[in-house]
Amino acid sequence: MSRPLKIITGTANPELAKEIAGILDTPISDALVTRFSDGEIRVQINETVRGADVFVIQSLTNPSNQHIMELLLILDALKRSSAGRITAVIPYYAYARQDRQDKPRTPVSAKVVADIISKVGAQRVVAVDLHSPQIQGFFDIPLDHISALPVIHEYIKKNMVLSNPVIVSPDAGGVERARLLANKLGCGIAIIYKRRPEPNKAEVLDVVGDIDGKEVIIIDDLIDTAGTMVAAANMLVNMGAKKIYACATHGVLSGPAVDRLTDSVVEEVVVTNTIPLQDKMFSKLKVVSIAPLLAEAIRRIHEEESVSSLFTH
């Protein structure tokens, strides 16, 4: 007899959780996630989960520490309630950019977050476009790393009129992502070489590849303050690019990002809904849903089917 499927969500991205639950034709389980008057998080699961296959959907978005703590307390409550299997579905993984010691006496924060999620009760993790692939190795439990490229590719095919496109990676670390998208679109790639003198500041130096007279699609895993994206777009236009489109999985859009992108030469900014963006919408921003991909991953895990075809090769 198969275990019943249960979906629980924290407060980070309830609309995405509802969309996933709707696709799976499964109601979101009754769970209380709120605050005591002193600010402490209160969690209570209000229905039985004994023996169930439970998926906790929680993006670790701003305020990240609050949403991490919500996830941990939900996982602990499920473990203590004898859930059959507990999977943390994390569309956006916080602290992912702190994945190594780039300076002396600094933490590897991405590993710390992975450790506590693994220790507190999760038996499996589903994540979307981690900033660094090596973060998969920080977990001592199975992790399914899902790529958002299929939904971004589908949007580009249906909504962008491209006669001579080129995919641009904004740094050397994103070359594989750019190559995969270029293969899907049947076009070439270019790479921006940049130096980052300090966090959230990037100095763009040069471009490797032909972008003259072409429609440029810059693809990245996230857009935070948009400094890198706007500087890259300006340089590409100065080098002869015809149009600039910006695509990313995670629309963090912190600080001056919205103003920078609004005033930039970028024609359109395409992100997914791994992070809720209701209060950050602007005319150039297009949001595509990651829910169908995550719903399919959940269905396959629940039914013990292979998830490998959802990875982008």
Image (cartoon, helix red, strand yellow):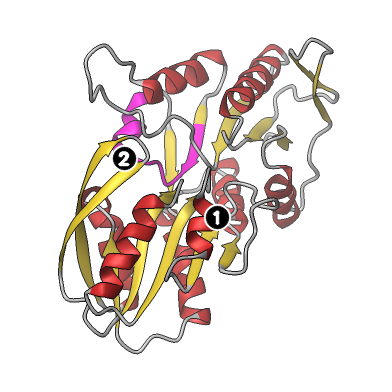
Q: CA distance from mark 1 to mark 2?
A: 28 Å
Within 10 angstroms of label 1, few (less than 14), some, or many (20 or more) residues? Answer: some
Mark drawn on residue 219: none
| Front residue (pair 31, 281) | 281
Name the residue carrying label 2.
Answer: 133
| Front residue (pair 242, 27) | 242
- The residue range painted magenta reads 125-138
Q: Is residue 4 visible?
A: no
15 over 120 or under it: above or below: below
Q: Residue at x 74, y 12 (%)?
A: 40
**Amino acid type at image mark 1:** Val
Residue found farthest to the bottom = 163
| Front residue (pair 31, 1) | 31
Does the magenta-highlighted stretch encompass residue 162?
Answer: no
**Amino acid type at image mark 2:** Pro
For mark 2, give the secondary structure: helix
Count the numbered circles shown. 2
Name the residue carrying label 1.
Answer: 258
Where residue 88 appears, as percent x and y from the top left, is 57, 32
Q: Residue at x 47, y 81 (%)?
A: 160
Q: Is residue 260 visible?
A: yes
Does the magenta-highlighted stretch encompass residue 128?
Answer: yes
Within 10 angstroms of label 2, few (less than 14), some, or many (20 or more) residues? Answer: few
Instruction: Kindly indicate the quadrant of the structure image that contains residue 135.
Output: top left
Query: Which mark is first along the chain, 2 or 1?
Result: 2
Q: Would residue 232 appear left or right of 206 to someone viewing this image?
A: right
Q: Quadrant of the C terminus?
A: bottom left
Q: Residue at x 57, y 50 (%)?
A: 294
Where residue 256 appears, as percent x and y from the top left, is 51, 48
